[in-house]
Image (cartoon, rainbow, N blue to C red):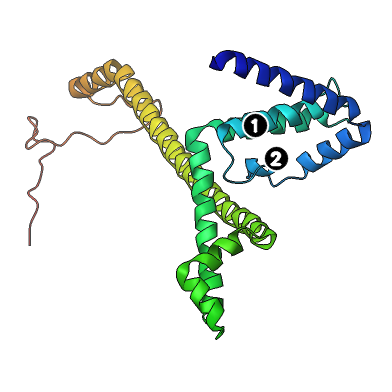
Amino acid sequence: MGEPNKSTSTAEEDLLLKTFFAEVSEVERDNEVIRILSCFKLNPFEYLKLPFDATPEEVKRQYRKLSLLVHPDKCKHPQSKEAFAALAKAQQLLLDEQERGYILSQVIAAKEELLAKRKKHLKKDTASKIKSLVEEGKYEQQYERTEEFKQELKLKVREILTDQEWRRRKMQMRISEEEGRLKKDEEETKEMWKKKREHEEQWEGTREQRVSSWRDFMKGGKKAKKGETRPPKLKTEDPNKSYVQRPVKRG
C-alpha cells in the first residue's frame, strides 16, 4: 500500500518542479549561481539554504531543486558549472555521517556559547518576569526561534569553523615541515652511506696495489729517484772497519 503512495508523491513532486522551473527566469538562475558562489565555503548548510536541523531527506530534496536551477545545461551563467559542483559537494558532506557530525558538533558549540552569553546578560536584568522565564527555560526556547538568534548562530558557526580550519591548516603545515625535515635527514643519511660505500670500494680496489707496494718496500726499500742521493744504511759495524756506528750518548 505504501509504494503506490510514494510513487504518486514523487510524480507530483516532479510535476511541481517542472512547473516551477518553467516559470524561473534566466535572471533568477544567474542570481542563484551568484548566491551559491558567495556562500561561506566551510558550511554546506549555507550552500543548500537549509537549517542546521535539516534531515538527510530534506538535504536530498533541496539539492535536487537547486541543482536543477543552476544546471549548466539549463543555466547560461559562465560559472554555473562551479555552482553546480559546489552544491554536489555540499550534499556529499551532509550525507556523510562523519562530516555531518563534525559540522553539527561545531553548531552545538556555537549555540552553547551564544546561550551562555545571553544568560550572563539576562542576569543583570532585574525584571522578575524575565527571570522566571529564564529559570523555566522558556525564554531560551523563544530566543532560539527568533531570526536574530538564527543569524547570530550562523555567524558564530562561521567563526568557529574558520578557527578550526585555521588550526587544522597550521597543524598540517607543521606536519608537512616535520615530514620535510625527516625526508631531508633520510636523504643526507643515504648520501653519507653512499659515500662511505664508495670509499670502501675504492679502498678495496687499491688493496692489491698497496700490498704490492708494501712488499717492494720490505724487499729493497723505496727506490731512489734519478739524481737523488740517499744516505748510507746504518750498520753496527762495517766489516772493513771503514765505518763504525758510534753509540749515542743519552742524558
Residue 162 vs 69, above or below: the answer is: below
* Within-10-Å neighbours for mark 1: few <14, some 14–19, many 20+: few
Query: Residue 187's spot in the image, x, y percent?
Result: 44, 33
Amino acid at the residue labelled 1:
Lys
Name the residue tied to disc 1.
89
Query: Residue 174's spot in the image, x, y percent?
Result: 49, 48
Q: Can residue 124 be seen in this view?
A: no
Residue 136 vs 232, above or below: the answer is: below
Classify residue 155 as left or right of residue 23: left
Q: Can residue 236 be seen in this view?
A: yes
Image quarter (top left, top right, bottom left or bottom right) of the N terminus: top right
Amino acid at the residue labelled 2:
Tyr
Image quarter (top left, top right, bottom left or bottom right) of the C terminus: bottom left
Classify residue 181 as left or right of residue 35: left
At numbered mark 1, what does the secondary structure look like: helix, strand or loop? helix
In terms of image quadrants, where is residue 236? top left
Which residue is more in the foreground, 124 or 89? 124
- Taking the view exactly as shown, the residue that stands out farthest to the front is 1
Mark drawn on residue 47: 2
* Comes first in the chain, label 1 or label 2: 2
Q: Is disc 1 in contact with disc 2, using a CB cutoff of under 8 Å?
A: yes
Residue 91 vs 138, above or below: the answer is: above
